[in-house]
Each structure stands twice: as structure tokens, then as C-alpha cells.
Image (cartoon, rainbow, N blue to C red):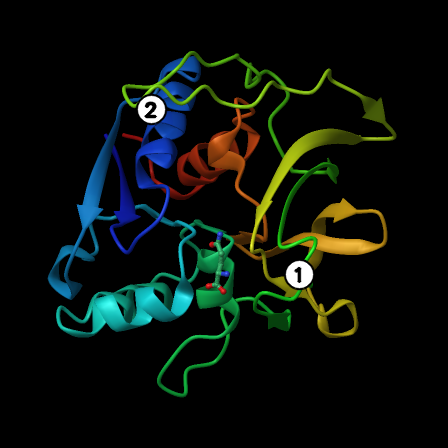
């Protein structure tokens, strides 16, 4: 049983959960989603983490009473090889942790940096994730219990190892290209919109709002690499 910690900070948590469970089913993995609400929930039995989007300042404030973010940061310091997926505000939390901690990804990031007209937009992004080939990750999704229908999955375009991904940017932050000192795994034109630093993946868009589960599948596959099988 693989335990995935989902930070209950704010934002699109339900969609992350659904994507993780669906990916786990595709890979025939037994997973448990653990809702993280306080620092004590983030213990060593957690094999990986998802930090969803939302409003990062609100997330920092909301976590103060239960010390959740602090617990998450300590967990990451103690388990530096366990995988973490941070989306949008989650990417900000990885790049700019509180409390004088060193960033968990070596990439500078600026909040709300797309200017007014482009605060929110959808665009096709080039993604190059280290995935095991056999995974079937592009299953279309149906409407959820709230009646949300996920965005259509782009037709698979294979262009020298990079494939397009439906990028949903919602008041997205922006990586400062000059300061990126780790692997680039997603680009939108000249912009870097996704990075990977060791086992930490940070993207400025919202893969959980689409039917494309490559990022969630990546997280699961990384967990398999980390967790000893017996
Ligand atoms: N604008 C938000 C922030 O700066 C991030 C938006 C998002 O997660 N969709 O925290």
C-alpha cells in the first residue's frame, strides 16, 4: 500500500485525488490518499506528497494554526528522495518556503506574474516527463460529482520525446528562466512552466484539471522506485 499525502491547504484537492486514484487503477497499484490537515499527519509513513494550487498567501496563513506547512517542510527535509508534486501555488511553496528554509527546487518564481490579460489562460505546453513507457495515462474523464467536465485531452503529439499537454494557467506564477538550476520538464514557447529537482516536480499550471494524468502517473512511478517491495 502506497500512501500519498494530499495537503488540505486550499484549491483543487478533489481533482488531484481523482487523478491519483485513476492513475493508480491504470497501474494496478494499491494507494491510500491521506488528507494532511496538521503537522502530525505528515509522518514517515507518507510515501509522497501533493501540494495543490490555491492562493499561496492564504495557504500559508491557513496552515499556521496546525503547523501543516512546517510539518510538510520538515518531512521534505527528512525524506529528500520521496516524490512531491506541486502545482501552481504548490510550486510557489516549493520554491519559496517559509521560515528561512532553503528552497526545495532550485528555480526562482514570481507570483501572479502573467500580467492582467493573461492572468488565466489555456495553452498547449510541451512536456517531457521521465515516465515508464507502458503506462496508459491518457484516459478521458467524465464529469465529476460537481458536474465539472475536465478539459479535453490533446491529441498525442510526439515531437522528439516531447509531447503536448493541455496547460491550464490560473493566475499562475512564472519561473524566472535565468534562475532555473534544475531540469526543465515543461515549456510554453520560451517560457519554463515546469521543473524537476531530484524527486520534486513543480509546475505553474494545473494538470489535475485536465484528463491527462501524466504528472500523477509520474508521482506513482516515483513512489514505486522509492518504496522497497517485499
Ligand atoms: N496566484 C496564486 C498565488 O500566487 C496561485 C494561483 C493558483 O494556484 N492557481 O498563490
Q: Residue at x 46, y 59 (%)?
A: 89
**Residue sitting at x 29%, y 71%:** 74
Q: Quadrant of the C terminus?
A: top left
The image shows residue 49, relative to residue 27, as above or below, that is below
User: How many numbered tags mark residues here?
Assistant: 2
Which residue is disc 1 drawn over? 116
What residue is at 20 percent from the left and 57 percent from the top? 42
Residue 185 percent across, percent down from the top left? 69, 47
Q: Is residue 81 above or below residue 205?
A: below
Rounded to the nearest angstrom, the CA distance separating label 2 from label 1 is: 35 Å
Residue 220 is at least partly visible in this image:
yes
Query: Quick check: is the Cβ at mark 2 less than 8 Å away from ligand 1?
Result: no
Q: How far across and how far down the image is residue 25, in percent?
A: 36, 15
Going by the image, does 171 lie left or right of 43? right
The local secondary structure at tag 2 comes to helix
Report the disc number at residue 21. 2
Give the number of the mark in front: 2 or 1: 1
Res 123 quadrant in image: top right
78 or 119: nearer the eye?
Answer: 119
Identify which residue, 125 or 54, lies in the foreground.
54
Q: To which quarter of the image does residue 27 belong?
A: top left
Amino acid at each position: 500500500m502506497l500512501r500519498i499525502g494530499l495537503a488540505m491547504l486550499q484549491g483543487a484537492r478533489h481533482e488531484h485525488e481523482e487523478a491519483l486514484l485513476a492513475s493508480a487503477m491504470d497501474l494496478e497499484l494499491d494507494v491510500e490518499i491521506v488528507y494532511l490537515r496538521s503537522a502530525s499527519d505528515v509522518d514517515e509513513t507518507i510515501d509522497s506528497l501533493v501540494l495543490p494550487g490555491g492562493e499561496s498567501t492564504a495557504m500559508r496563513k491557513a496552515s499556521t494554526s496546525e503547523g501543516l506547512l512546517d510539518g510538510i517542510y520538515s518531512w521534505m527535509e527528512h525524506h529528500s528522495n520521496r516524490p512531491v508534486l506541486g502545482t501552481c501555488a504548490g510550486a510557489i511553496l516549493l520554491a519559496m518556503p517559509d521560515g528561512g528554509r532553503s528552497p526545495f527546487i532550485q528555480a526562482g518564481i514570481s507570483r501572479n506574474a502573467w500580467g492582467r490579460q493573461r492572468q488565466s489562460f489555456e495553452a498547449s505546453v510541451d512536456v517531457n516527463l521521465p515516465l515508464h513507457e507502458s503506462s496508459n495515462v491518457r484516459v478521458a474523464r467524465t464529469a465529476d460529482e460537481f458536474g465539472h467536465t475536465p478539459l479535453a485531452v490533446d491529441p498525442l503529439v510526439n515531437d522528439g520525446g516531447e509531447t503536448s499537454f493541455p496547460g491550464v494557467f490560473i493566475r499562475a506564477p512564472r519561473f524566472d528562466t535565468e534562475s532555473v538550476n534544475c531540469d526543465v520538464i515543461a515549456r510554453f514557447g520560451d517560457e519554463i512552466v515546469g521543473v524537476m529537482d531530484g524527486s520534486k516536480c513543480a509546475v505553474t499550471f494545473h494538470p489535475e484539471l485536465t484528463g491527462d494524468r501524466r504528472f500523477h502517473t509520474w508521482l506513482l512511478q516515483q513512489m514505486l522506485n522509492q518504496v522497497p517491495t517485499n
